[in-house]
Amino acid sequence: MHIGVAATPDVAIPTLDWLLQSEYSLDLVITQPDRPAGRGRTLTQSVVGDWAVANEISLFKPNSPAELIGKIENLDLILTIGYGVLLPEHILHLPKYGFLNLHFSLLPAYRGAAPAQRALQNGELKTGVTVFQLDKGMDTGPIYSQATIEIKSSWRSFELLHELANIGAQSVSEALQLVKQGQAPTIQNGTASIAPKITKAEAKIDFTQSSEQIVNAIRAFTYEPGAWTTWKGEPFKITSARAANAHIFPVGTLAMIEASVLVGTGDGSIEILSVIPSGKKEMTASEWARGARLSGGEIFG
């Protein structure tokens, strides 16, 4: 079976690595065009593009879906993984078996751009991956395979995505076997929910929320776009925290208890574990507190 992969982020790499060693022929990698990145805004290729070059796989970076016409008709199937481009329905029918997508939730839950992040934000205890047939809807197509994992309470979004990417390859393998055997996918069943893209504005920490809600938001938004507040008028990211509701302080007010840095919430407080102050690298909260000479009583925002 001749396969193409349309992908952009690093979560596609485990599946690409597996495909390279599999019985299938990986003929084409499709990724988004180079984008400005870094402080110098230098045009930079996606990590998937770098992978294709390193492994000598044919690479295509279309500026629009229309450029796929004439490029993919000889493929049996294209697998998409976070490609980031909405494909028109007529494009989906060009390969022999159409397009499959590896999605990082147990569909129909968390359809959309940020399923892993929204699962963490909502305090889910489990999630998983789904491989399904793309159709004209948003993550609405019939399902070939799914796999479930339990979410550890310490995981942040990048850690959860790492785990999901690793189990995704096995689900892709199962799905491709079903396609090869001519088995039809199963229509999605259950309660659907949406996982919209996260904005920087909503990643601002609201200290009037409960400690659990704030900790879950920090887990969900770290490192992109980053859960943030302000300190002395500058952006200030909190990258890990845990509930500390035995201590109650005014909302948004900092407190020092021995070496611990706490801040008041709507129902108690959280202990801040690590931070990224404006213009600096990530550090522990206690390191920041020493440098900032916190005495307690200061207020975020």
Image: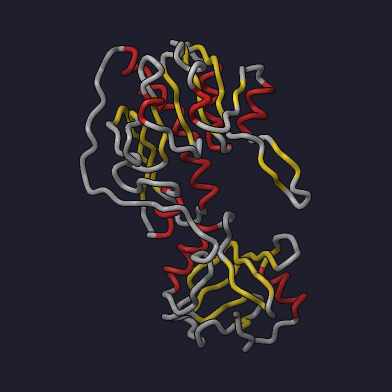
Scheme by which the image is coloured:
secondary structure
- Which corner quadrant holds the C terminus? bottom right
Does residue 18 lie above or below 110 as drawn? above
* Side of 228 where 142 appears, left or right: left
Q: Quadrant of residue 141?
A: top left
Horizontal and vertical percent position of residue 36: 70, 44
Q: Residue at x 44, y 32 (%)?
A: 168
Horizontal and vertical percent position of residue 155: 50, 53
- Which corner quadrant holds the N terminus? top left
Q: Residue at x 68, y 23 (%)?
A: 53
Q: Residue at x 31, y 41 (%)?
A: 107
Horizontal and vertical percent position of residue 56: 66, 17
Residue 259 or residue 280, whichever sits in front: 280
Q: How many marks do you count on the picture?
A: 0
Horizontal and vertical percent position of residue 80: 46, 30
Q: Quadrant of residue 239?
A: bottom right
Q: Residue at x 35, y 46 (%)?
A: 111
* Side of 118 where 106 appears, left or right: left
* Side of 142 where 80 appears, left or right: right
* Side of 26 where 121 appears, left or right: left
